[in-house]
Amino acid sequence: MASEPSNNLPLFYNDLMPLNSRDHGNWRSKPVDSAKWLASQHAFPITVDEFALAQRHFPIVFSDGENPVPLALMGLNEGINVFVNTEGKLTSDVYVPAYIRRYPFLLARLQQDSDNMSLCFDPTSPTLGEFKDGEVLFVDGQPSDFTKGVMEFCENFEMAGQRTQAFIGELKEHDLLMDGEVAIQRNDAEEGAPPFVYRGFKIINQEKFGQISGEQLEKWNKSGLLLLVYAHLLSLDHMRVIFALQTAMGKGPGAEAEKAKKTKK
């Protein structure tokens, strides 16, 4: 999950610029209590290091495609996030994925033929600039303690990304990922009404997982992979919880069905 500057910028990022003391020596980072860019996003990448905390709040699924990525779902439909308001402020005490906390910074390779990574940032972010208040980014031309902390956070995120890739590699090697499908029915649905079906993601195939040899399971138990599998499977129960939250907020297909039902009356 290492991020690299390209025409296909990571989620949230509108542009990337290397942080340096020449151009940003007088810049500061100011804290914000809201992030409007979160309100319209429903799925966020997470690393295996976060599964234990994330599974308490969100469904953890895997993106579709050749290179699946674990995703924490903060909503089931595009443009819906049940944990933030329209201003991007958290409405409940939930775990915030590291991917979100990393913004507007990230480590990126400035040269494709080099393994060296530089600390970059999104220059369109309102959190960085020549402010009077906030955390200084450089002191006497050298990275401040704040900037060193950011660098360490981003380095840890990249290492967690490597562990996540290794986890995905194990799942793919044993053909454990399958197309996911979740059917959810409203409690007050009329008899015979079809459920709301969600697809377009991958989950672990429990039937194939049950056929894994004891020897392999023992290896995964020692490596911690089993805990990751169980965290993922247990987290899927949150699908119905989030569906209910969406409906209560007047959003999503459940709310649309409720409006249609009232209109008929």
Image: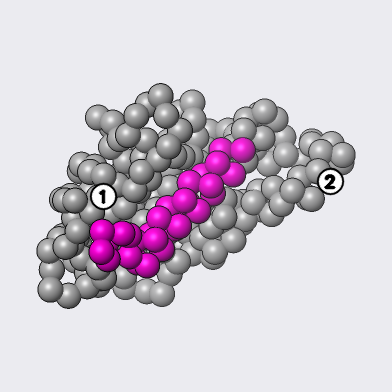
Locate residue 172: give its quadrant. Answer: top right
Expressed as whole percent of the image width and height from the top left, the position of residue 35 reads 23, 62
Nearest to the observer: residue 11 or residue 261: 11
Q: Would residue 151 be counted in the magenta stretch?
A: yes
How many marks can you see? 2
Q: What's the magenta bit mostly, secondary-structure-wise?
A: helix
Residue 227 visible? The answer is yes
Query: Outermost residue toward the front?
Result: 140
* Magenta part of the chain: 137-166
Give above or below for 31 relative to 246: below
Residue shown at 19%/51% (left/top)?
A: 22
Say what amino acid the circle numbered 2 marks.
Glu
- Mark 1 or 2 closer to N-term? 1
Which residue matches tag 2? 218
Whole-number angstrom distance, CA of label 1 to CA of label 2:
45 Å
Residue shown at 47%/51% (left/top)?
A: 155
Say what amino acid the circle numbered 1 marks.
Leu
Residue shown at 81%/38% (left/top)?
A: 216
Expressed as whole percent of the image width and height from the top left, the position of residue 37 reads 23, 55
Nearest to the observer: residue 65 or residue 141: 141
Nearest to the observer: residue 184 or residue 167: 167
Expressed as whole percent of the image width and height from the top left, the position of residue 230 reads 67, 53
Mark 2 surroundings within 10 Å by alpha-carbon count, few (fewer than 14), some (14 through 19), many (20 or more): few
Residue 202 shows which numbered tag? none
Residue 19 shows which numbered tag? 1
